[in-house]
């Protein structure tokens, strides 16, 4: 009888642990609505490592001519690491460190366009809102120091936006 009781208790604790693991949602997909308006759609994936930290990456690309939008980047890939200071898991106020690898247009005095590759490291701040149905709203702003082609590309680049997405 003791063995059966022990087996039932062990089985129920494993089942409860497995259920707790399933309830933790660790993946997010987001779209930057602000950059989408300017013809530079940005899509992000974020993986939650713990309740107070996550890693992710954003990919953005220009779909219109830069003369129409003022955005000189053509393509951008930006991995990031975030630390959260909120009550909900991976939500609330956050600080992030990020890198960026991108291509950018530069114009000479003769109005010739050239494309250059750039790399940058920076920091950002933001806030992430999470609904009970796991929809995400996020506002962020950051700046990075460019480390390559600074003669042809700006020394400081910006990062930020208004993101909408889903946690699953």
Image (cartoon, rainbow, N blue to C red):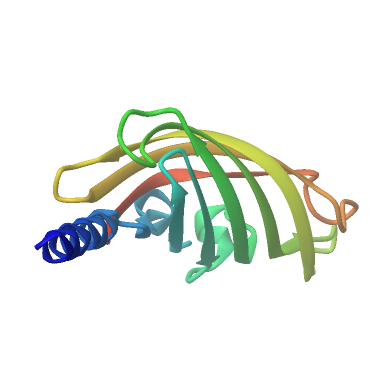
168 or 37, which lies in front? Answer: 168
> Residue at 41% across / 41% down in the picture?
51
Q: Residue furthest right?
A: 151
Looking at the image, the residue that sits furthest to the left is 1
Location of the C terminus (image quadrant)? bottom left
Which residue occupies the foreground of this view, 55 or 65?
55
Q: Is residue 87 left or right of residue 97?
A: left
Q: Position of residue 46 (x, y in %)?
A: 45, 57
Q: Quarter-wise, where is residue 153 in the image?
A: bottom right
The residue lying at 58 percent from left, 55 percent from top is 71
Residue 106 at x, y = what percent?
77, 61
Residue drawn at point x = 54 percent, y = 60 percent: 57
User: In this image, 77 relative to 122: left or right?
Assistant: left
Would residue 113 be visible to someone looking at this image?
Answer: no
Residue most extreme to the front: 1
Quadrant (top left, top right, bottom left, bottom right) of the N terminus: bottom left
Left or right: where does residue 19 sit relative to residue 74?
A: left
Check the image and report above or below for 88 versus 148.
above
Image location (x, y in percent) of residue 64: 49, 69
- Left or right relative to 68: residue 77: right
Establish if 21 lies above or below 96.
Answer: below
Estimate the x, y position of residue 79 in percent, counting from the top left: 61, 58
Q: Is residue 59 above or below residue 99?
A: below
Residue 112, quarter of the rendered image: bottom right
Q: Is residue 158 visible?
A: yes
Camera-nearest residue between 39 and 117: 117
């Amino acid at each position: 009888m003791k063995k059966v009781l022990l087996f039932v208790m062990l089985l129920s604790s494993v089942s409860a642990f497995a259920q707790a693991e399933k309830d933790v949602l660790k993946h997010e997909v987001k779209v930057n609505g602000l950059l989408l308006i300017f013809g530079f759609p940005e899509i992000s994936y974020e993986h939650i490592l713990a309740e107070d930290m996550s890693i992710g990456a954003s990919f953005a690309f220009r779909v219109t001519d830069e003369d129409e939008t003022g955005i000189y980047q053509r393509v951008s890939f930006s991995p990031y690491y975030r630390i959260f200071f909120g009550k909900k898991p991976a939500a609330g106020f956050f600080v992030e460190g990020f890198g960026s690898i991108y291509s950018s247009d530069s114009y000479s005095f003769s109005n010739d366009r050239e494309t250059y590759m750039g790399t940058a490291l920076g920091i950002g701040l933001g806030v992430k809102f999470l609904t009970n149905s796991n929809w995400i709203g996020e506002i962020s702003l950051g700046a990075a120091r460019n480390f390559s082609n600074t003669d042809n590309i700006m020394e400081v680049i910006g990062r930020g936006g208004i993101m909408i997405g889903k946690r699953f």
